[in-house]
Amino acid sequence: MSTLKKVLETKKEGLLNIYCTAGYPQLNDLPTIVNALHDAGVDMVEIGIPYSDPIADGETIQQSNAVALKNGITIDLIFEQLKQCNKNIPKIVMTYFNPVFKYGLEHFCEQCQKVGVDGIIIPDLPLELYQSSYEKMFQKYGLSPIFLITPQTSRERLKFIDELSSTFIYAVSSSSTTGKSTGINEGSTYLSGLKNLGLQHPVLVGFNISTSEDLALVNEHAQGGIIGSAFIKHLRENTSPQEACHTFVKKITSC
Amino acid sequence: MKYDVDEQGFYGDFGGAFIPEMLHPNIQELKSSYRKILNDDAFKKELSSLLKDYVGRPTPLYFAKRLSEHYGANIYLKREDLCHTGAHKINNTLGQVLLAQRLNKSRIIAETGAGQHGVATATACALKGLECIVYMGAKDIERQAPNVSRMKMLGAEVRPVHSGSKTLKDATNEAIRDWINNQDDTHYIIGSVVGPDPYPDLVTQLQAIISEEIKNQMDGLPTHVVACVGGGSNAIGAFYHFLEDETVDLIGVEAGGLGVKTDKSAATLALGSRGVLHASMSYLMQTSDGQVIEPHSISAGLDYPGIGPLHAHLHDCKRVLYSNVTDQEALDAANRLMQLEGIIPALESSHALAYLEKMTFNSTDKIVINLSGRGDKDMSTYINAAT
Ligand SMILES: Cc1ncc(COP(=O)(O)O)c(C=O)c1O
């Protein structure tokens, strides 16, 4: 069983998933950040593989992607860095379809398995294409696909997504790009309805969580939260990534 | 039609809708309604009356006598440069604004490179009283200044884009992000035959009027139709009704920049490989790691690292020949047209004209060059090149 499945089985609420961009702020910071997040008690990490044209991302993550690419990050280097990360924290990679397609999907999946990646988020991979072309391949390499749902996702699609999922479902707090500063309250009627969607899989909420209040609200209605832009901003404002991991986790879990 | 899009939104291996879930409702709404709306009698009537009285269609098919003598063949220019706003782009934006009204969208967004699509969108929005926001790369804002002023005068808001290469690709990313963040009231008018299904087909259908008219205006079939290719909308417009006439040679001309052997080029089919850019599978210029390469062309409208999926398909099945010419060859061709015919072409269209230098002719050949736009916006580039 993957470390991700184990964590989801033992912990049913208050799951904390933190996103970082590989190659950011410095080229080789990934192992330091992942290991520090693990030490700070984070339940899983989402590792962004930078892409030149991240259309679902707001300014903060766009910028971290651009800096990482400028630093010289490559997919092969990320796989090398992942080998230096603690084995016990579940790892999910997040990227766009093109880098994975160009790298070669099967080769990519194989590398993921080798370095202990449990899940993958490709927001622009169409569900139908996943099902017809890639589901068997992902399964072969023990890689769980994680799909997004939004307040606008139809019942029918929710059911389809639930069926294609094997770990958790990523609910987007409001239909937007990442890192909108409006906060999460806006979507709270959606949040309170999450439990009634009839989904088999646990739901983690992401996009636009930036304060401990946001996270507490999310935890009331879902199994956990995913934080990206707020953490990237915190990294940007601190000189030591290791320290930044600890101070951030402390701050975001403070209520 | 043999080359039409299939039910899944693909042309052979190319196309599709590689979109994040956030855009699914918008794309679904468009996909389920656009064909019906385009074929609706009231829509067709309103659009064709605007195309006639407002745009000035049909645009002339002009026999270029001195250019013909120069090359020793019969050369015709399809005068899209005479359209209102100065390029073929208005064919698409008027159609899409009428479509947006029928979808009850009050806010229009667009991306632009040369500014021609931005001006055409701002124009159609002014005509119909819709809010209009145009994303434009900071670099393009500099090199296409007259069009920026035109958009503003027409009441549009021009939002500069500072990410990436600060050109068309990045403006397109930003427009897509805007759409993700403003779904309910917004329609995105994409400016070429790119983007997620159903955009490539939607824009193709709206530009196909170019080849429909050429067919009516010509005595018999041409031997060749030549057009420049950025995303590919004027080219597909000029090719569409000839696709099944296999005797007609169709030639798409990409921007070679400083040359395809340098790292300053935008010739996607010469330099690209398969991949997804702006939500459709096609060819694109990319690194071995799948990062999109920043292109270069003297012409902002061709400065794009991708190409529409239908062109990728037509390239693979060899129905259309894709070639490229350099910045300098395009400039030379522009000067030739100015001096032989008294027409100042857009830099984009000059790429199609430059291809004449690479052809060998029979004196009976009938060659149609799609003159996609006029050169007003490019005056500073032409003046700088001349000094
Ligand atoms: C005059 C003109 N021709 C051609 C193009 C290229 O676009 P497409 O390849 O979609 O026709 C542009 C784009 O701005 C243009 O302004």
Image: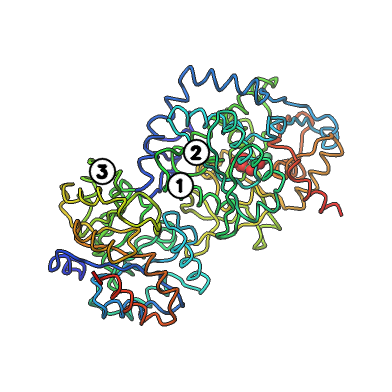
Disc 3 is attached to a residue of which chain?
Answer: A
Q: Nearer the viewer, residue B131 or A70?
A: B131
Q: Nearer the viewer, mark 2 or mark 3?
A: 3
| Position in image of residue B28 (x %, y %) | 37, 37
The reply to whether callout 1 and callout 3 are in contact (CB within 8 Å) is: no
Cα distance in 3D space between marks 1 and 2:
9 Å
Q: Which residue is mark 3?
A: A157
Q: Is A86 situated above or below A229?
A: below
Q: Is B186 situated above or below B61?
A: below
Query: Which residue lies at the image location 37% right of the left edge and 73% below the top edge?
Result: A79
Q: Which residue is mark 2?
A: B200
Check the picture and name the quadrant holding the N terminus of chain A.
Answer: bottom left
Q: Which residue is mark 1?
A: B280
| Position in image of residue A116 (x %, y %) | 27, 72
The reply to whether callout 1 and callout 2 are in contact (CB within 8 Å) is: yes
- Kindly identify the amino acid type of the residue bearing the numbered disc 3: Arg
- Kindly identify the amino acid type of the residue bearing the numbered disc 1: Ser
Q: In the image, which disc is placed on residue B373?
A: none
Disc 2 is attached to a residue of which chain?
Answer: B
Element on which disc 3 rests: helix
Q: Is residue B255 left or right of residue B380?
A: left
Disc 1 is attached to a residue of which chain?
Answer: B
Do the residues at discs 1 and 3 belong to one chain? no
Cα distance in 3D space between marks 1 and 3:
21 Å
Mark with earlier residue (1, 2) = 2
Q: Is A221 situated above or below A154?
A: below
Check the picture and name the quadrant holding the C terminus of chain A.
Answer: bottom left
| Position in image of residue A102 (x %, y %) | 44, 60
Q: Label 3: how many residues lie within 10 Å, few (<14), some (14-19) or many (20+)?
A: few
Element on which disc 2 rests: helix
Q: Label 2: how many residues lie within 10 Å, few (<14), some (14-19) or many (20+)?
A: many
The answer to whether the beta carbon of the residue marked 2 is less than 8 Å from any atom of ligand 1 is no
